[in-house]
Amino acid sequence: MAHPILKEFSRKKTLAYARAIPEEGHLGPVLFPVVTVNELTFEYWKELNLLPVSASLQAYGAEAQIASREGAEKVSGEIPPIKRKIYLDERNMLALKREGAGDIDMVRDKLYNDIDNMISAVFARVERMRTQALTTGRMALKENGVQLNVNYGVPAAHRQRPTNSWDNAGARTIIADIQAWTQLIEADTGTRPTRALTSDTVANLMLTDQTIRNLIWGPVGDQRPVTFQEINRLLATMDLPQIATYNKRVRSQNENGTYNTFRFFPADMFVLMPETKLGDTLMGPTAEALLDNEVEARDVAGIYASVTHEDEPPMIWTKAAATAMITLPAADLLYQAQVIF
């Protein structure tokens, strides 16, 4: 028989708790806001050219020039599930049996911590998907039986390396590269990039760049230090994008229980972006919610969380699940450069 404490973790309460947890520390929700949908597939059209086409002059009474409907590229795919669960350890199970002073409170806190951790794990996997779309223009998933490949259609001309790696102090041309990429995006799309995202690794190379130092301080300040705020002020005077860094790291767990640590945003990348959002984070219904009699139909889409009991063997499981996919209709407006190679 389930312990009475589980009444505190009814599905209505765990769902409300889960959906009130903010996705803190991630940049992705700013670039790809969360949108809940009731489908497990997605489909949208990416416009291939945003430059306006000029109308022509016509004599009075003449028929208007007929416009050609330019091609658009359809991006579609499935919204895959993401889930993680953990069981209550033996120490806490014994505490439920003892029901001594503080035992129930300890278990209650543990279960809430488990919900927090499982939801954070789901959020982290979604963030990995966002940064993959942002830095590669593709979604390549191959794990635990899921295989999914989505090409968001970033033009090949917008995914080129600079002539010289930015860690080559004697040959790099950082400011000239940013100027060229900014002008290319504007020429191709009619929209000028206003933001750029990179890593602290790349930012540190910019801080030590002699050309940047000379542009800020002139020849008399050859040895003066440069701050990142000063670099952005310089870029603003040149009508170039303002740069931010994203250095958050996350771990993944292997089948053997070991962990790998990696960055959300690769250390060698530099991405130019428009001022507007880039797309959406679609979150659809989960199988868990659809099959759960305690979840109302209007609540099946979005993050799911549950605390459940098994009699044989006696275990309490805490689980979080979601279905998520990233859209990138602004693919043409990006420039994705691997600047260290």
Image: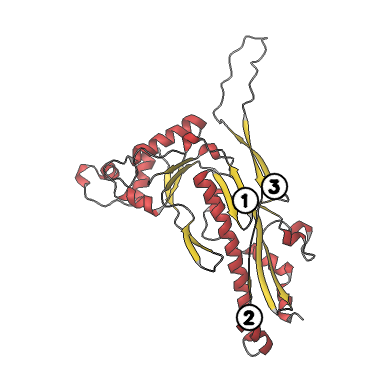
Mark nearest the camera among 2 and 1 is 1
Q: Name the one closer to the observer, 121 or 15.
A: 121
**In the structure shown, which secondary structural element does the residue marked by tag 1 occupy?**
strand
Q: Is residue 326 visible?
A: no
For the residues labelled 2 and 1, the Cα–Cα distance comes to 38 Å
For the N terminus, the quadrant is bottom right
**In the structure shown, which secondary structural element does the residue marked by tag 2 occupy?**
helix
- Three-letter amino acid code at disc 1? Gln
For this view, does 241 lie left or right of residue 16? left
Q: Which mark is residue 107?
A: 2
Labels 2 and 3: the sequence-earlier one: 3
For this view, does 121 lie left or right of residue 340? right
For the residues labelled 2 and 3, the Cα–Cα distance comes to 39 Å
Q: Which residue is mark 1?
A: 147
**Where does the image place residue 5, in percent across and percent down from the top left?**
71, 80
- Three-letter amino acid code at disc 3? Thr
Q: Is residue 300 visible?
A: yes
Mark nearest the camera among 2 and 3 is 3
* 232 lies above or below 5: above
Labels 2 and 1: the sequence-earlier one: 2
Q: Which residue is mark 3?
A: 41
